[in-house]
Image: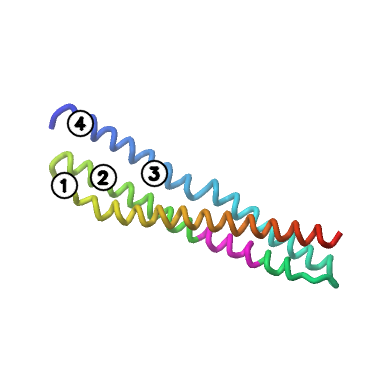
């Protein structure tokens, strides 16, 4: 194995370490915000429901659905994000073995395809959870403004 291959393998190993960090990170930040705001929105909606007993609460009901869907879709994005990152690590390890000559070239391609699907789903779920949360917040603001 030449110096260039050794350097490449070292870079790939460092990449694995970075990808493992992304696995952890993908389970934390954006999702914590969505979960916190959606949970808070559900609690606020419940309070509004109690305080406006005689009002038409259709907007609050719909907001509840959107807050709840933001939580559920966010959970799905957690799952797909986890698998995308795990497949990324697996694919990189196979690349290392290919460079060392221990694995047939191209064996990582099917895993790469699966990883791309999970990455797409994760981005779609994150976008959908953000859209659901935003819609719910707008509905609550509309409800409050219409009741003043």
Q: Residues within 10 Å of mark 3 (few under 14, many from 20)?
A: some
- The quarter of the rendered structure image containing the C terminus is bottom right
- The quarter of the rendered structure image containing the N terminus is top left
Across and down, in percent, residue 43 comes to: 72, 61
Q: Label 1 to label 3, Cα distance in Å? A: 24 Å
**SS category of the residue bearing label 3:** helix
Mark 1 or 2: in front is 1
The mark nearer the N terminus, 1 or 2, is 2
Q: Report the predominant secondary structure element of the magenta stretch.
A: helix
Across and down, in percent, residue 146 comes to: 81, 61
Q: Which residue is mark 4?
A: 6
Q: Label 2 to label 4, Cα distance in Å? A: 14 Å
**SS category of the residue bearing label 1:** loop
Does the residue at mark 4 contact the one at mark 1 (Cβ under 8 Å)? no
Left or right: 147, with 131 as reference point: right
Q: Which residue is mark 1?
A: 105
**Range shown magenta:** 65-75
| Picture quadrant where residue 64 is located | bottom right
Q: Which residue is mark 2?
A: 93
Reply yes or no: does residue 70 show up in magenta.
Answer: yes
């Amino acid at each position: 194995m030449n110096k260039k291959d050794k350097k490449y393998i070292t870079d790939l190993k460092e990449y694995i370490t970075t990808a493992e960090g992304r696995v952890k990170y993908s389970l934390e930040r954006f999702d914590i915000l969505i979960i916190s705001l959606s949970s808070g929105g559900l609690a606020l909606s419940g309070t509004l429901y109690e305080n406006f007993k005689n009002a038409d609460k259709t907007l609050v009901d719909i907001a509840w659905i959107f807050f709840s869907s933001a939580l559920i879709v966010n959970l799905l994005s957690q799952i797909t994000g986890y698998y995308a990152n795990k497949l990324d690590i697996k694919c990189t390890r196979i690349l290392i073995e290919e460079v060392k000559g221990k694995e047939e070239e191209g064996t990582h391609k099917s895993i790469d395809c699966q990883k791309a699907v999970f990455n797409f789903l994760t981005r779609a779920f994150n976008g959908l959870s953000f859209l659901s949360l935003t819609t719910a917040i707008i509905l609550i603001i509309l409800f409050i403004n219409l009741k003043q």
